[in-house]
Image (cartoon, rainbow, N blue to C red):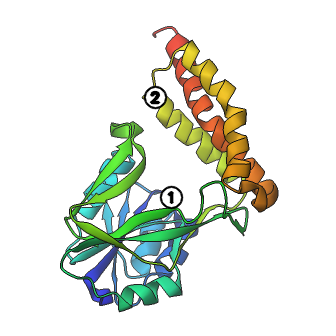
Amino acid sequence: MDASEITFVVLTKNEAARIGDCLASVPAGAKTLVYDSASTDGTAALAEAQGARVVDGPWRGFAQTRLDAAALVDTPWTFMLDADERVTPELALEISRADAPDDIAAYSVPRRNYFCGAWIRGAGWWPDRLVRLFRTGKAGIQARNSGDAALHETWTVQGASAELEAPLDHHSYDDLAQYRAKFERYTDIEASAAQPDALALSGLATLAPLRALWLLLGRGAIADGWRGAYIAWFSALYPVAVAAKAMRARSRPAS
């Protein structure tokens, strides 16, 4: 697959600290499209300096904004990339050697997630296989919830998909503060669409320790040391936090 046939699409909002390394990882000869939503930290200028086409577009939630950006691609293939992700040299090479049959609409890639400087293999974080490379116009999105509350979105394709084996690197959390900030942000978003009752919240809270134990032992997070234990516990707490925040919001008097 020739690199000139692919556009790498990146959504940004104040990603000046990461957009440079992200774009630098894109294979030579490929196009890059940065869909920026009102950054104030120079993200757009940095992206343009690296040869990216920058489009200033509105933020309409994760799922819809990805679709908006993908609709602007004019090459046969689209690769959706996040600002905190890096295309590894091994993945770039594998893509260049791919010879997609006509019936293959997309490729999935294994994502190598890093947490506080270490690659996490347990807790379901590896191989974290996701569809990222697809024929332009042949993919849609499924997401939990809808509208602005749509999260954990995945690409679905019209046709068969194949697997690439080389990893995509994901440097999502450099420290615990970044993890907690995203935890709070995402649970806030999901809580805006949730409608739990006290019984549901109680059930989630009761199951949380069991889920954490399952992630530690059943999904191998224990092999990742303290990082794995931290991830297991907060992953188990996630639905509890969503339900609790939704309950608090419902109990506030209308203004």
Q: Residue at x 77, y 61 (%)?
A: 223
Residue 220 x/y as whole percent: 70, 57
Q: Where residue 112 sits in the image (x, y, percent)? A: 58, 69
| Amino acid type of the residue tagged 1 in the rendering | Asn
Residue beneath label 1, please? 14
Q: Is residue 108 above or below residue 193?
A: below
Q: Mark 2 packing: few (<14 Cα in 10 Å), some, or many (20+)?
A: some
Q: Secondary structure at mark 1?
A: loop
Q: Residue at x 66, y 30 (%)?
A: 207
For the N terminus, the image quarter is: bottom left
Is residue 231 in view from this perspective? Answer: no
**Image quarter for residue 95?**
bottom left
Crowd class of label 1 (few under 14; some 14 to 19; many from 20; radius 10 Å):
some
Q: Nearer the viewer, residue 208 or 78?
A: 208
Task: Looking at this view, name the residue that lies furthest to the right.
Answer: 226
For discs 1 and 2, the disc positioned in front in the rendered view: 2
Residue 134: percent from the left, percent from the top?
29, 70
Q: Position of residue 230 (x, y in %)?
A: 75, 48
For the residues marked 1 and 2, what is the alpha-carbon distance in whole angstroms? 24 Å
Q: For the residue marked with disc 2, what is the amino acid?
A: Ser
User: In percent of the image, x 73 and y 50: which residue is there?
Assistant: 217
Residue 124, quarter of picture: bottom right
Q: Which residue is mark 2?
A: 192
